[in-house]
Image (spheres, grey):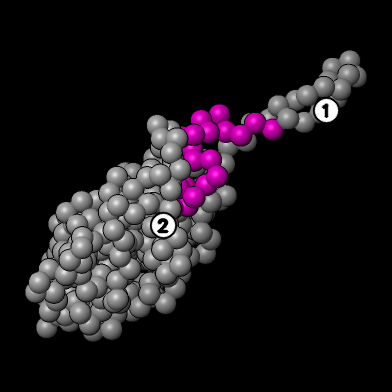
Amino acid sequence: MYPRVDEFMSSPVVVVRPDESLAHARRLMLRYRVGRLVVVDDALRPIGVLTRSDIARVAASPRSSRSLDAIRVEEAMTRDPVTIRLGRSIREAARLMLQHGVSGLPVVDESGRVVGVITKTDVVRAYAERLRGKYRAQDVMYRDPPTASPQHSIYYVAELLDSHPSRRVLIVDGGRLVGIVAPSDIAFLAEPPAARGREGKRIRRFEELPKGRLGPVYYYTVPVAADIMTPDPVTVGPDEDLAAVASLMIRGGFSSVPVVVDEEPVGIVVKHSILRAVVEKG
């Protein structure tokens, strides 16, 4: 029997009105340390969801010169969010998240008012606490995830990220796992690869030129995987209980755990893997 949504949801919910500003929404996220807000009407029924990514997308848009104080929540929110009722199971929540490609669901009562939020992380926590002994890491891991060397350029790594459903690249040196790269590692760069261009960063130095003259010499440096990877990631073996893997994710704040044999990567478990285990293998 799977646990219920209301046992693991976050409550009370941080809400915002559609006519309030993105600046106000951003302050709420910072104050309450949340990554999403439920947008509600006057009856506290959810009509949208606003995430940090939504605000970042609007703020970074080259077509908008307005400040966040001048942009309303309804202009950036995702409308008509998928919801789940109180009392439904974690398995149903995981199914809805996978079906609709979302990472969280507003939880509503019988009258349709929002009373909580359930996220992928909450489902992983429920698996860690209640579903030990059902599956092993190798039962749900993504096999043969993409790999790169520490000296591969981040442009190559960025392409690999988009080539595999795990959305991870394992960094391997001499057959041994030495790091991992996630989409956030590239997204949080001061200058993403697309903005900087493939020529890399230009550095100017004054050096001795032919005939003994001094002058500027330009060097182009391309950032590599070693510059952005998370080094020495926590790993598990293929036979590790999946609930123990889920517990590692919760304790460490990880979204993924590589699976290795003799330090060589053979797979990776991500939160999505655990949701699939809940839905498809239940």
Which residue position holds label 1?
A: 207
> Horizontally, is 282 left or right of 123 in the view?
left
- In the image, 258 versus 192, the foreground residue is 192
For residue 257: magenta? no
- The reply to whether residue 276 is in sight is no
Question: Residue 36's quadrant in the figure?
Answer: bottom left
Q: Earlier in the sequence, mark 1 or mark 2?
A: 2
- In the image, 260 versus 269, the foreground residue is 269
**What is the residue that sits farthest to the left in this orientation?**
110
Q: Compared to 247, does 273 lie above or below?
A: above
- Looking at the image, do the residues carrying marks 1 and 2 touch, with CB atoms under 8 Å apart? no
Residues drawn in magenta: 183-203
Instruction: Determine the residue positioned at 69% across, 33% down.
Output: 203
Q: Compared to 18, does 276 lie above or below?
A: below
As helix, strand or loop, the secondary structure at mark 2 comes to helix
**What is the residue that sits farthest to the top in this orientation?**
211
Q: Given the image, on which type of amino acid does mark 2 rest? A: His
Instruction: Determine the residue positioned at 52% across, 64% down.
Output: 232
Which residue position holds label 2?
A: 24
- In the image, 71 versus 141, the foreground residue is 71
As helix, strand or loop, the secondary structure at mark 1 comes to strand
For the N terminus, the image quarter is bottom left
